[in-house]
Image (cartoon, rainbow, N blue to C red):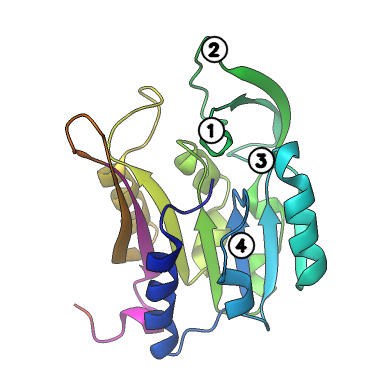
Amino acid sequence: MTLGNVDEFLRFFSHCEALGFQPALVVDVGVGEGTPGLMSRFPKAHFLLVEPLEEYYPTVSKLAREYDATFLNCALGSTERLGEISIGAPLETSSTSGARSPHKETRPVEIRRLDDLKKWEVESRPIFGRISVQGAEQDVLNGGRHFLEHADLIVIECSCFRFRGERQPILHEMIEHMNGAGYSVLSMFNLQYRPYDMAMASVDVAFARRKGSLMAGKK
């Protein structure tokens, strides 16, 4: 559940910093092994780290001790419930999207709503979100409508094909969803390709609030 190319991600954030963007709160959904350089880049920010897999617990717990961070060992979705996570190989492909494969292990997992984690309207801004949940992106956002009203910049790993079944949102649907929530595409990076035909398989998309400072002067 980590971003594909850390260097591209950090270069993007260097650009945002040059525009004056310094988040007060970072919400990282699907932390995995963490994103090297992200937490040290914003030492004054508070981090909310969401990761359901027990295999990553030692790593994320260590990050939470080293930085101003809160660790939540759960998944996120549109409703609060006891759900199921399909364990992938490699581990970062694990997902609560509902798609199953006969060779994959499944586990019960606590699923919470993003809007139940914080009172977003009273949080310090700017707020940055990173979502890497392997096909469950729209489900996470449907449980975070208030979060979307108050966040400033959100990076989402978007798929270009429905690798996880018909319920999986793909790139143009995520762009439409975020457009309806008041966001525009600021940048795209970390393109991944299908090996057998080199079709673009996934990309990390940075969505900025349309009326925010990062979109100032852009039409």
Query: Residue at horizontal 54%, vertical 28%?
Result: 89
Residue placed under numbered mark 4 in the picture: 27
Give amino acid for label 3. Answer: Ala
Give amino acid for label 4. Answer: Val
Q: Which callout, 2 or 4, points to the residue nearer the camera?
A: 2
Q: Which callout, 2 or 3, points to the residue nearer the camera?
A: 2
Give amino acid for label 2. Answer: His
Dot 2 and dot 4 residues touching (CB under 8 Å): no
Query: Residue at horizontal 30%, vertical 85%?
Result: 216
Q: CA distance from mark 1 to mark 2?
A: 13 Å
Q: CA distance from mark 1 to mark 4?
A: 24 Å
Left or right, residue 42 beside residue 185 = right
Number of numbered labels in the structure image: 4
The quadrant holding residue 215 is: bottom left
Residue furthest out toward the right: 65
Residue placed under numbered mark 1 in the picture: 90
Q: Position of residue 168 (x, y in %)?
A: 39, 31
Q: Give the residues drawn in magenta, as a range.
A: 201-217
Query: Please, is residue 66 above or below residue 72 in the view?
Result: below
Query: Please, is residue 131 above or below residue 202 in the view?
Result: below
Which of 137/105 is in front? 105
Query: Residue at horizontal 75%, vertical 72%?
Result: 67
Q: Earlier in the sequence, mark 2 or mark 3?
A: 3
For disc 2, the neighbor class at 10 Å (few under 14, some 14 to 19, many from 20) is few
Q: Earlier in the sequence, mark 1 or mark 2?
A: 1
Q: Does residue 214 show up magenta in the picture?
A: yes
Left or right, residue 83 beside residue 157 = right
